[in-house]
Amino acid sequence: MINVTFTIRNKMKNLLLIISVLLCMQVSTAQEESAFQDGEWFKFKMSYSGFLKAGNATLSVDETKLDGRPVYHVVGKGWTTGAIKWFFKVKDRYESYFDKETGIPYKFIRKINEGGHTKDIEIAFNHKTKEALVENKKHKTTKIITTEQDVQDMVSAFYYLRNNYDTEHIKVSDVVSLNMFFDEENYNFKLKFLGRETIDTELGGKMKTLKFRPYVMAGRVFKEQESLTLWVSADKNKIPLKIKADLAVGSLRADLVAFKGLKHPLQMEFD
C-alpha cells in the first residue's frame, strides 16, 4: 500500500504540472486563425483507476497589459481532493504572461505546495539577449540564465502551439519538438503523434481527437519513458480532452469536465 501511495503521489504531481501545458501540443504548418480568445476557461477532473477522485485543475485566459504591452495572462491551478488529499495535499498555481500577437512569454510564475514541498519562482524573459532572470522568492535569490532560441515556458507553449501549428497533414509517428525553460533549466520537449481516435468525453458526447505521447529528457521534469497518453479535439479549438498515466497499479487520468469562452463552435457527436 505504501508503494502504491508513493506512486500515486508522484503521478499526481506530474499530472497537475502537465495539465497546464502538455495537453494540446500540435504540429505542422502555421494557422491563420486564433484557436483561443479572452475568457476561455477549462476545468479538469482527475481520478485514480477511473473511480477514485484525486483532484481538479483549471486553466483561464484573460487579456491585459504588462509593461504597456498587450498580453494574454493565463492562470493554471491544480489541487487534490477527496481521499487522495489525506495522503498527499497539492495546491499549485502557474501563471504566464505572453505577447498577444507573437505568443512569446515575458513572465512566468510558479507557486506550489506539494505535500509540504514548496516553491515560489518568478521568471522574466529577455528574448533579445536570450536570457531569463530567475527570482526564487522562497530562498531570496536571483540568477540570470542563458535561454535557447524561441524559448517558451510551460504554460505559454500550450497556447503558442495551438495558435501557430495545425494538424491537417500530420502522420502517425511524426514528432514535434520545442525549446522550453522551467525553473532554472532549458530542455527540449518532444511529442509524438499516435493517430486519430473518436472518444467518449465527460462533456456528454463523443469527439474526434488527435492522440499524442510526450517524451522529454530523462532526469528533467519527467522520466523519458513516462507512460502518458493525451487526446485533444480535432477541430479549430484544439482543446485538451483527456490525459492518462499508466501506473504499476491502476492508472491516473484527467478529463475535461467543463469549459466556457471557446473561440469556435465545439464539434461534438451525440448518440
Image (cartoon, rainbow, N blue to C red):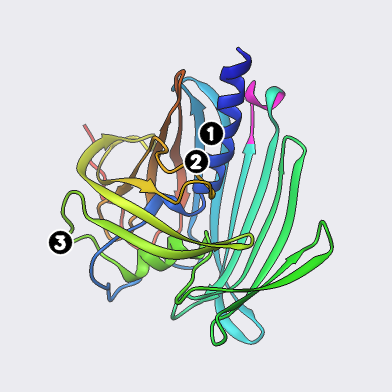
Please identify the residue farthest to the front as the structure is shown: 219
Q: Are marks 2 and 3 in contact (CB under 8 Å)?
A: no
Which residue is located at x 45 percent, y 77 percent?
149
Query: Do labels 3 and 1 touch, CB within 8 Å?
Result: no
Residue drawn at (66%, 47%), measured in percent from left and top?
92
Say if mark 1 contacts mark 2, CB within 8 Å. no
Image vertical order of residue 265 relative to residue 98, above or below: above
x and y percent of residue 229 in the render? 35, 39
Amino acid on which disc 3 is placed: His
Numbered label attached to residue 44: 2
Spatial distance from mark 2 to mark 3, Cα to Cα?
Answer: 29 Å
In this orientation, does residue 181 appear? yes
Q: Residue furthest top?
A: 1
Q: Position of residue 220 (x, y in %)?
A: 53, 50
The boundaries of the magenta stretch are 80-86
Q: Which residue is mark 1?
A: 11
